[in-house]
Amino acid sequence: MAGKTIVVANWKMNPATMREAKKLFDAERKTAEKSRGSSVVIAPPAIFLRELSSMYRGSKVAFAVQNAHFEAGGAHTGEISLVQAKDARAKYVIVGHAERRAEGETDDDARKKVAAALSLKMTPILCVGESSRTDEGEQYDVVREQLRLGLADVAASSLPRVLLVYEPLWTIGKATAMNPREMHQMAIFIRKCVVESHGEGGRSLKILYGGSVDEKNAAAMLREGDVLGFLVGRASVKADEFAKLLQAIETA
Ligand code: PEP
């Protein structure tokens, strides 16, 4: 992935049918194959994962699950495990997404999922971000605590295997993304926290941004936001918007 912009396509609970999922995947796979500047990870609903991954023979697209349980098995009705996700060819797992935190996922769950993913040689995509900002800078306390807990079981030597997404709740599903300069400040703060907790290796933590990323704001965010890529919701479930987004990334 070195040098390429990491684009994680979070399809959330879309589309409605396997047929549409195949169509969307096929279009995005073609876009990813043409792109020289992006490295694409697609996170479809888990129910579509195995069929999509088994029909794909290429190497330009990797697969993620949007969530998985840290236990390898057991009495967890309705859950899927990281082991099962890996067996269906997911290499990545999104952890602590704001929408899952809103459903009750805790920092402690995130910590266990991050550690379990690393032990299975999967890449955790840990999401952090405040729900709102205050003049007193409460956002920094929230992010520091989410980092402290979410990365608590990660050895310094494993930090390069983690993707960290800063995704403030107030930018998800909205009309505009965050200002790149504010992202830059937050990236500096995140690195500082991780250097404090994990040592100098924290400086090279891979930081992505998420929240209303589209073809109009991606290039500026890459140039000025101090991020290596994006977690993308809405613009990843429309094949034409996704193609325009990757095109905009090429020109950044
Ligand atoms: C997301 O799902 O993580 C997200 C950022 O959504 P959107 O791009 O639609 O704001």
Image: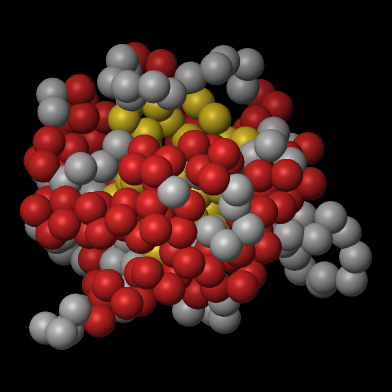
Image point (57%, 39%), residue name: 157
Quarter-of-image position of residue 122: top right
- Residue 30 in percent (x, y) is at 41, 20
Residue 42 seen anywhere in this rendered image of the structure: no
Establish if 170 lies above or below 51. below
Residue 115 seen anywhere in this rendered image of the structure: yes
Image point (20%, 23%), residue name: 250
- Residue 168 in percent (x, y) is at 29, 67
Establish if 141 lies above or below 129. below
Q: Nearer the viewer, residue 193 or 66?
A: 193
Q: Quadrant of the C terminus?
A: top left
Image point (38%, 52%), residue name: 195
Q: Quadrant of the N terminus?
A: top left
- Coloring applied to the structure: secondary structure
Q: State left or right for residue 116 relative to residue 45.
A: right
Q: Nearer the viewer, residue 206 or 98?
A: 206
Q: State left or right for residue 110 relative to residue 2.
A: right
Q: State left or right for residue 218 relative to residue 211.
A: left
Establish if 73 lies above or below 5. below
- Residue 47 in percent (x, y) is at 68, 50
Image point (73%, 59%), residue name: 70
Q: Residue furthest right?
A: 74
Q: Nearer the viewer, residue 76 or 106?
A: 106
